[in-house]
Amino acid sequence: MKKVVILAMENSVLSTIASPMDMLLQAGVLWNITMGEQPQPLFDVKIVTADGQPVTALNNIPVIPACSMHDIADVDLIIIPSQGFFVEVESAAHGERVAWLRERYQSGVDLASICAGAFTLASTGLLDGRKATTHWALTNQFTKLFPAVDLRTDLMVTEEDRLFCGGGITADTDLSLHLIEKYCGRELALQGSRCMLVDLNRTSQAPFAVFIPNKRHNDEAMLQAQEWMEANYKKSFQMDELATKAGLSLRQFNRRFKSATGETAVKYLQQVRVDASKLLLATTQKTFDEISPIVGYENVSFFRKVFRNSVGLTPLDFRRKFGKFPQH
């Protein structure tokens, strides 16, 4: 039986404590009961806090731990729940948790984070040079604090060197199924998927994401270029026009733009246009052929490929999933 600890903190999102606890505790139990077989629990799950005292979840519900994290002698996996968007990485309590997590990992314990829990995991330094994910809306904040991490917010779940991350808050279910499959095999994960009515194959955050441009930099010329693109994305223009506006060569412009924003200028413009097209797909009944030139692409076939690569869905599938008008 795998021994799992969930490290609860002040302002933890309660569902990212309760959901993985329920998912793991039901592995080998709920399916067996449903099939008329003897339950065979596969996980022992406990909630702990740094000092063994209760903490208050983000929704003001108290979380009562089994004990202090320092009282845990034997554990296979530690899960770090989300703290919503209330991320703090400088307090003494945070430092204590980070040191404990680093020590446990070095002793052979696996570590997993959910949503903003990745900030705590990244604070250990263990994610440097490794793949990780968090909620797509936290991308700019995370990369500023942890530039050495290979952040992949297009992914729902990541795994590398015994370090696991789940993207958003409800990605706790995706992470839980991933962990069940990792420790117990795919058949057990499929059983959990069927019992909990959760899709086992949900791999990408991309369809849900909204482009949030990084404007937290001090390059005024690049900020003006960003704002010009956002105001004029419907027009047809070349990047050398923007370079000229900034008084730079195209090469200098591209280098400075990537340094300031984290994106190439071409990719930035594509994302602005894709987001504009997503809004039109969701809120109007215009066809994609009609939308493409409205957002600056005369070549509909090319833009369809750009859209699919960016969103992970075809325009039609995106409309079916997020459109305000019923699709038949």
Image (cartoon, rainbow, N blue to C red):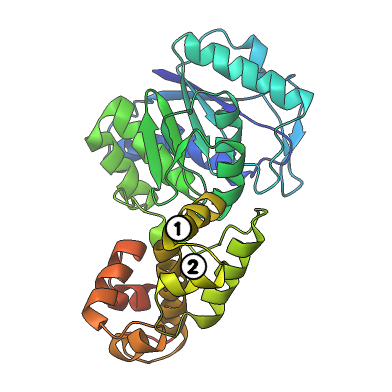
Q: Secondary structure at mark 1?
A: helix
Seen from the viewer's position, the closer of residues 17 and 32 is 17
Residue at the image position 45 percent from the left and 58 percent from the top? 254
Seen from the viewer's position, the closer of residues 49 and 298 is 298
The residues tagged by marks 1 and 2 sit, at their Cα atoms, a distance apart of: 8 Å
**Residue type at mark 2?**
Ala
Query: Residue 234, relative to residue 30: is it above or below?
Result: below
Sequence order check, earlier mark of 1 and 2: 2
The answer to whether residue 257 of the structure is visible from this angle is: yes
Q: Secondary structure at mark 2?
A: helix
The answer to whether residue 38 of the structure is visible from this angle is: no
Name the quadrant of the N terminus.
top left
Seen from the viewer's position, the closer of residues 191 and 108 is 108
When asked about the image quadrant of residue 240, the answer is: bottom left
Near mark 1 (Cα within 10 A), the count class, few <14, some 14-19 or many ≥20, is many
**Residue type at mark 1?**
Asn
Question: Does 73 sit left or right of 309 as displayed?
Answer: right
Pointers 1 and 2 in contact (CB under 8 A)?
A: yes
Give the labeled residue for mark 2. 243
Give the labeled residue for mark 1. 254
Near mark 2 (Cα within 10 A), the count class, few <14, some 14-19 or many ≥20, is many
Question: Does 187 sit left or right of 7 as displayed?
Answer: left
Residue at the image position 37 percent from the left and 73 percent from the top? 321
Query: Residue 150, relative to residue 270: is it above or below?
Result: above
When asked about the image quadrant of residue 117, the answer is: top right
Name the quadrant of the C terminus.
bottom left
Query: Residue 97, relative to residue 144: is it above or below?
Result: above
Residue at the image position 35 percent from the left and 73 percent from the top? 318
Query: Residue 122, relative to residue 227: is it above or below?
Result: above
Q: Position of residue 284 (x, y in %)?
A: 44, 90
